[in-house]
Amino acid sequence: MVVAGDEICASPLFARAADVARLIWCTKRGLRDTVNEMLLYPERLMVSKYLDPLRILTGMGRRASALSMQLAKKKRREDAKVALSRFALRPLNVNIGCGGQPFKDWLNLDLDSEAKADIIWNVTDGLPFASGACAFIYCEHFLEHLAIEDGVRFLAECHRSLQERGVVRIGMPSAQEIVRHYFESDWANQPWLEKYGFTWIKTRAEYINVCFREWGHQWLYDVEELQRRLREAGFTQIEIVKWGESRHFELRNRETRIETLLICEATK
Ligand SMILES: C[S@@+](CC[C@H](N)C(=O)[O-])C[C@H]1O[C@@H](n2cnc3c(N)ncnc32)[C@H](O)[C@@H]1O
């Protein structure tokens, strides 16, 4: 049943009024900060840049965008809580950065609202699970999309979220394989170049730059680097595994990409 209060909240007029209220709030804070700064550092008044309207506007703009990010984060947190409470299976099996490849009966998470995810979430905000809540965590072609500091934080969050003997499986492109191909005469004959329409690449340099920079790649790994970063995140039991193969039934036949050439499982 819709009550009168709900109707008001859902109305476009209410949304507009809320926007105006937010704008006034930001303007007030922007002005207050500027006045505070002038009171704290009166000598700066001599150089009148603090009264520059452009500067005041920029400050307001920054506050407004920080506020809208805060609100988006708050909404993601609330939505995640609801999605988690509706998900019946425990302990959780979680597919992170699922994109268009969700797993049935797993909790699928992605930052992109267009992804087929149960939870829209940015892992740079941590993972929205209680400590020890997950049995298995999986991600394919995901970790290399995070800057290295965020990547290690993410792995540490996996460690925290896993139950004892829980396992995270990570599949990704292999920096070692990419570089090996660079030195081979048939470097241009790799199936994934054709699969993703990258046959336009003309030189080895173009090839290697694409591998390291395209698709938002931030940091590529080889075995040594992945093991090192997993250790930094708290894992001690780390095993390099083959495509589709696992000692754990839940983690078998999960890879979907032929170019997933570096795969490992780390156990808590
Ligand atoms: C290359 S796609 C891989 C999708 C899928 N795993 C696959 O193999 O087809 C990387 C996915 O990670 C997601 N992603 C990137 N950064 C993220 C972040 N900080 N938090 C959550 N998801 C993120 C992207 O939205 C994208 O769906």
Image (spheres, grey):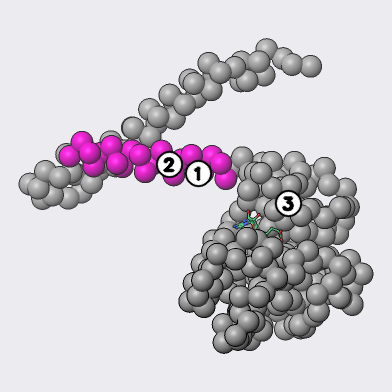
Distance Cα–Cα, label 2 vs label 3: 29 Å
Q: Which sits in the foreground, 117 or 214? A: 214
Disc marking residue 118: none
Question: Badge 3: few (under 14), some or many (20 or more) residues near its Cα, within 10 Å?
Answer: few
The magenta region covers 52-73
Image side of residue 252 versus residue 218, left or right: right
Distance Cα–Cα, label 2 vs label 1: 6 Å
Position of the C terminus, as image quadrant, is: bottom right
- Residue type at mark 3 is Gly
Residue 128's image quarter?
bottom right
Image side of residue 27 versus residue 85, left or right: left
Residue underneath mark 2: 65
Disc marking residue 100: 3
Circles 2, 1 touching at the beta carbon (< 8 Å): yes
User: Which residue is rendered at x = 61% and y = 40% of the image?
Assistant: 75
Disc marking residue 69: 1
Image side of residue 113 versus residue 38, left or right: right
First in sequence, mark 1 or 3: give its number.
1
